[in-house]
Image (tube, rainbow, N blue to C red):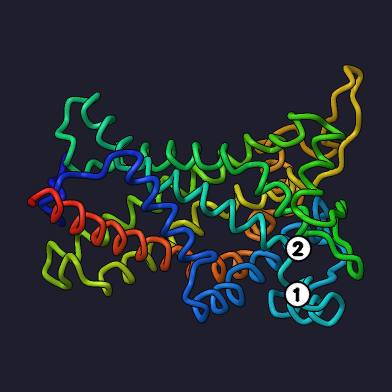
């Protein structure tokens, strides 16, 4: 059944380029843009939580009895990392995280609406109508585009965050910095090394993106439709993005665990001279082995840390995107009237 989306703006929709730029600006706001207090807040909450999530996902990998527990929980990861590695340990992988979020959210937020409208038109529906099927499909496809573009950055980010000279867990990859990581992987494996795990990255981001914007827009439209909050209220954006973050976590966590393990697994040279992972053939193989050996809890390792990272990021990114889009439309349409 096709439901009509409440009209949130009377102006014309953004083009793909305009949407990408607004999405990228929103990502910068969440990851690295001023004001300074916002940066410190997100550095404290977002990236350290990602470090904790990565290490918890690798702990007890493919061990039936759970293996040796180096970390008890998210807080224990932070405490031990800070004590043994200092601020550099807590903030490992921060630089590639900045660039990755710009590419991912520029694509995910910028391409979502163009894809959704095109899918609607292809299936014979009005381009402006909110259809669950095309909304989910557009979210998945736009997420896959962002994941593909940002895969090398996510790869080195995950490896840098997993590395610990004091309490190593899983395979360890030491890089001096982001450039050293990219060049080291390229020298050792060529271009194939930089796209390692891209199938897992597409699966992870597609699952997350397939529910992120549809759940965000659905909640926002329901709040407006039932008169709970006005369409242009910041509280509307905040409440909608909070629920969206929870939906993303539930849908994406198993694939996120598979991605971390696919990126970090050791490799060997096969008979054909190509490097292959020693533990998993592909993300589906990783999900199956994790479920079979570690159970459902294995798929959701690090979920608390993941939510602590994804919730503020989702709230700020989606809220900032709507505010930036609204401001841009007012400026653009105001100029066109003159």
Q: Residue furthest front?
A: 338
Of residues 146 and 20, the one nearer the viewer is 20
Label 1 and label 2: CA atoms lie apart by: 8 Å
Residue, disc 1: 77
Residue ID at (61%, 42%): 201
Residue ID at (87%, 51%): 171
- Residue 139 placed where, x, y %? 39, 43
305 shown above or below 188: below
Instruction: Say which label, 1 or 2, has the lower sequence index.
Output: 2
Image quarter hosting the N terminus: top left
Return the mark for residue 55. Answer: 2
208 shown above or below 228: above
- Residue 100 placed where, x, y %? 58, 51
Mark 1–mark 2 CB contact (< 8 Å)? yes
Residue ID at (36%, 53%): 22
Dividing the picture into quarters, in which one does residue 198 lie?
top right
- Residue 24 placed where, x, y %? 44, 52
Q: Secondary structure at mark 2?
A: helix
Q: Secondary structure at mark 1?
A: helix
Q: Residue furthest left?
A: 337
Residue ID at (43%, 36%): 141
Dividing the picture into quarters, in which one does residue 147 lie?
top right
- Residue 249 placed where, x, y %? 51, 59
Mark 2, Cα crowd under 10 Å, few <14 / some 14-19 / many 20+, is many
């Amino acid at each position: 059944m096709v439901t009509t989306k409440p009209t949130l703006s009377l102006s014309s929709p953004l083009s793909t380029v305009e949407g990408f730029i607004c999405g990228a600006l929103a990502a910068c706001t969440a990851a690295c843009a001023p004001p300074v207090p916002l940066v410190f807040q997100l550095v404290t909450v977002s990236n350290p939580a990602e470090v904790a999530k990565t290490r918890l996902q690798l702990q007890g990998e493919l061990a039936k009895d759970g293996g040796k527990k180096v970390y008890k929980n998210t807080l224990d990861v932070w405490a031990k990392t800070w004590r043994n590695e200092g601020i550099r340990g807590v903030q490992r992988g921060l630089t590639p995280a900045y660039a990755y979020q710009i590419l991912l959210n520029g694509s995910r937020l910028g391409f979502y609406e163009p894809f959704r409208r095109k899918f609607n038109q292809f299936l014979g529906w009005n381009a402006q109508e909110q259809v669950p099927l095309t909304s989910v499909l557009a979210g998945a496809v736009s997420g896959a585009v962002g994941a593909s573009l940002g895969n090398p950055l996510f790869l080195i980010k995950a490896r840098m965050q997993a590395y610990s000279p004091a309490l190593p867990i899983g395979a360890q990859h030491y890089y001096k910095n982001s450039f050293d990581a990219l060049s080291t992987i390229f020298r050792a494996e060529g271009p194939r090394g930089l796209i390692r795990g891209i199938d897992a990255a597409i699966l992870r981001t597609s699952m997350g993106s397939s529910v992120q914007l549809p759940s965000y827009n659905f909640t926002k439209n329901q709040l407006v439709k039932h008169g709970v909050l006005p369409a242009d209220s910041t509280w509307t954006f905040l409440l909608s993005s909070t629920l969206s973050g929870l939906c993303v976590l539930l849908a994406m966590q198993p694939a996120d665990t598979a991605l971390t393990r696919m990126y970090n697994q050791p490799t060997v040279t096969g008979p054909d001279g190509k490097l292959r992972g020693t533990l998993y053939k592909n993300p589906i193989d990783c999900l199956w082995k994790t479920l079979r050996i570690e159970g459902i809890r294995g798929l959701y390792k690090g979920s608390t840390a993941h939510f602590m990272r994804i919730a503020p990021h989702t709230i700020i990114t989606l809220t900032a995107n709507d505010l930036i889009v609204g401001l841009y439309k007012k400026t653009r349409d105001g100029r066109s009237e003159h």
